[in-house]
Amino acid sequence: MKAREFEQKKAEQWREYDSQMQLLESPKKGQDLDAEQIPQMIRERCQELSIARHRMYGEAVCEFLNQQVIRGHKVLARSSGGFVEKTLHFFSQEFPQVMRREWKLHILCWLFFLIPLFGMWISIHYDLDWVRSILGSDGMAGMDSMYGKGEEANLDMRDETGANFMMFGHYVHNNIGIDFQIIAGGILAGVGSLFILLMNGLGIGGAMAYVIEYGDPVKFFTFVSGHAPYELTGMVVAGMAGMRIGLGLLNPGRMSRGRALLESGKRGLPLVYGAFILTFMAACVEGFWSAHSFTPWIKYTVGFVGWALLILYFVFAGRGKREA
């Protein structure tokens, strides 16, 4: 094939490539952009450049194709934006898309948390020893002091300067520490993550059951309702990240286990970010809202709204054609 014939055969593909590049390079990308075909089109230009050089089709053709390859490389390799843009992209698209993609792990982790939680709640009606074994005497005494019947809960001690921020720092340290443990448990083939979720379910379920049976449930639920959506979801998302790491070790495929661990870590990284962000949000609510004495219906409304917003966010965010 001569150079002229080569140019005539490829002319239509080059025009289509040029139009797609113009859409990508414009500030406002058009709706006609076929993003899925862009990498294939760039590979085709690379192959054509190699053929043109091998067959010595001339400087003009080789230089034209070289510029087209450079143009495509710039589009693929250019910066994805600054910190603000990347953060907005993560919240609006990447995180909810990953949550939907890992829906099986989402359900599994919730089950490992909720089944022991409700199991402890049910068990207290038959045998208090289960709750005693989980909480211990110190834990039950703590529940009595904070949520006991006929006594003021020792929660709203925020009159001192900086007390809200002090409690916020405490909750960040404590809850993110739990998330780290859950994620790190994924190294044990995911079993560690599930075990820590199960133990947290037992602990929270035992505390909830004890207060409902022997304390003042209104004090308990008005305190936890505001931050529970973010704290519990963050804990479950951390479990998903740990399980993703564990599954990479269990099923490395054709990769070495070290390489599989690295790849599964990359895949689970959005879940790690999401877990810490949700836990940070929970600490903000717990530190600056939960302990204040608003009426119960306001506290419960804030909690229900939090759950509803999380569900809507994970179900609908990032579903547009361009986002996908």
Image (cartoon, grey):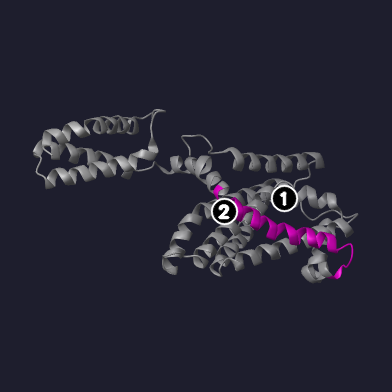
Report x, y in % for residue 241: 55, 58
How packed is label 2: few (under 14 Cα within 10 Å), some, or many (20 or more)? many
Left or right: residue 286 compared with residue 256 = right
Query: Gap between marks 2 and 1, in whole Å?
Result: 25 Å
How packed is label 1: few (under 14 Cα within 10 Å), some, or many (20 or more)? some
- Identify which residue, 170 or 97, lies in the foreground: 97
User: Principal SS element in the magenta part?
Assistant: helix
- Mark identifier at residue 158: 1
Query: Could you say which quadrant of the image residue 72 lies in?
Result: top left
**Residue 96 visible, this angle:** yes
Q: Nearer the viewer, mark 2 or mark 1?
A: 2
Residue 128, relative to residue 115: is it above or below?
below
Q: Per the image, is 303 magenta?
A: no
Q: Tell me the residue at 76%/50% (across/down).
A: 223
Q: The N terminus lies in which quarter of the figure?
A: top left
Q: Residue beneath label 2, please?
A: 276
Residue 60, relative to residue 144: is it above or below?
above
Query: Could you say which quadrant of the image residue 132 lies in?
Result: bottom right
Q: Tell me the residue at 42%/65% (across/down).
A: 254
What segment is highlighted magenta in the picture?
Answer: 101-129
- Identify which residue, 275 or 267, lies in the foreground: 267
Q: Marks 1 and 2: in contact by CB < 8 Å?
A: no
Report x, y in % for residue 76: 32, 43
Q: Per the image, is 123 magenta?
A: yes
Tell me which numbered mark, 2 or 1, is placed earlier along the sequence.
Answer: 1
The amino acid type found where label 1 is placed reads Arg
The amino acid type found where label 2 is placed reads Phe
Left or right: residue 73 compared with residue 253 = left
**Residue 73 visible, this angle:** no
Left or right: residue 206 compared with residue 286 = right
